[in-house]
Image: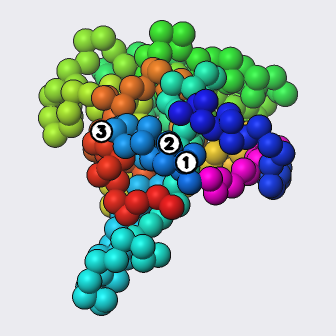
Amino acid sequence: MDAILDAAAAAPPAAEIADEYGVTHRLWPVFDEKTIASVVREMAAQKLVIADGHHRYETALAYRDECRKQSGKKDPNAPYEKTMMTFFNTRGEGLLILPTHRVVANVAGFDARAFRSKMASVFEQEHYSLHGPMALAAIRRDLIDPEGKPIIGMYTHTAAGSGESAHGELTLFHLRPEADLAALLPDVSPAQRQLDLVLLHRLLLEKGLGITAAAVKDERNLSYERELPEAIAAVDEGRAQASFLLIPSASNRSPASRWPAKCCRKNPPTSIPSCSAASPSTG
């Protein structure tokens, strides 16, 4: 598959644009029927994992079904039978799954110290203060687990007082080896229990802070930040009480066989058995 794409991209791109993050995107349209047939053949038996956009996919299915009902027939060439997708090779060199950080606000009676104490039986914790311009670099350095085990950071801010200057505080949560996840999360599959997002949402947010799935859906207490500095700034500027920080994950540390059917919002991927089952087809 990579060889087919490399051959198609040998010519100059039809379009090139840099996004707001400084990432350059290039577009090569492919019209050659033999090339398209080769792509279809190579992808037919592949496992498709929706890393982002399962809501759009489900909406596309619902729209297709509605249009089929209205037309009273199935037309494989109808526009509603197709939806646009972007595919990435999960074994591609250097592929990294970037996190979306959770920003918490409007939690009644929020107390970081009491929260840490409440979660101590489930998570080992490292807690320390951060001062000055090196704080962000320290967070980036410490949000790394060389063994690929779940690690979740919580950033809070302490106002000046009692002889102390205002400063940030970082807590690193590591799941305790003896934690009984089967008892804590009986309705969650063993594979899902190892995912940092599940641990964050079901244990830290729901059991620790009382932020329910309904509250998450309505975004009453939770918003999302792609960039780490913005998640930190939301707390430092008083717009949030805490930011929960996640680490990037190499795709080879998150094999598709471990990914659940559906998880939290801004979630680990939705798994689909094969591309042939991923109707509506891509166009």
* Residue pictured at 78% horizontal, 31% vertical: 165
Estimate the x, y position of residue 18 in percent, counting from the top left.
83, 50
From the image, tell me which residue sits under label 3. Answer: 260
Estimate the x, y position of residue 265 in percent, counting from the top left.
43, 51
Q: Three-letter amino acid code at disc 2? A: Ser
Identify the disc placed on residue 197. Answer: none
Q: Three-letter amino acid code at disc 3? A: Pro
* Residue pictured at 46% horizontal, 58% vertical: 282
Q: Are marks 2 and 1 in contact (CB under 8 Å)?
A: yes
Give yes or no for residue 223 being in the magenta stretch. Answer: no
Dot 3 or dot 2: first in sequence order is: 2
Cα–Cα span, label 1 and label 3: 35 Å
Q: Secondary structure at mark 3?
A: loop
Q: Secondary structure at mark 1?
A: helix
Q: Is residue 37 visible?
A: yes
Q: Secondary structure at mark 2?
A: helix
* Residue pictured at 15% horizontal, 28% vertical: 183
Residues in magenta, as a range: 22-32
Disc 3 crowd rating (10 Å Cα; few below 14, some 14-19, many 20+) is many
Dot 1 or dot 3: first in sequence order is: 1
Give whichever of 216, 109 is nearer the camera.
Answer: 216
Q: Three-letter amino acid code at disc 1? A: Lys
| Magenta: main secondary structure | loop
From the image, tell me which residue sits under label 2. Answer: 38
From the image, tell me which residue sits under label 1. Answer: 34
Give whichever of 127, 260 is nearer the camera.
Answer: 260
Disc 1 crowd rating (10 Å Cα; few below 14, some 14-19, many 20+) is few
Estimate the x, y position of residue 150 in percent, counting from the top left.
43, 22
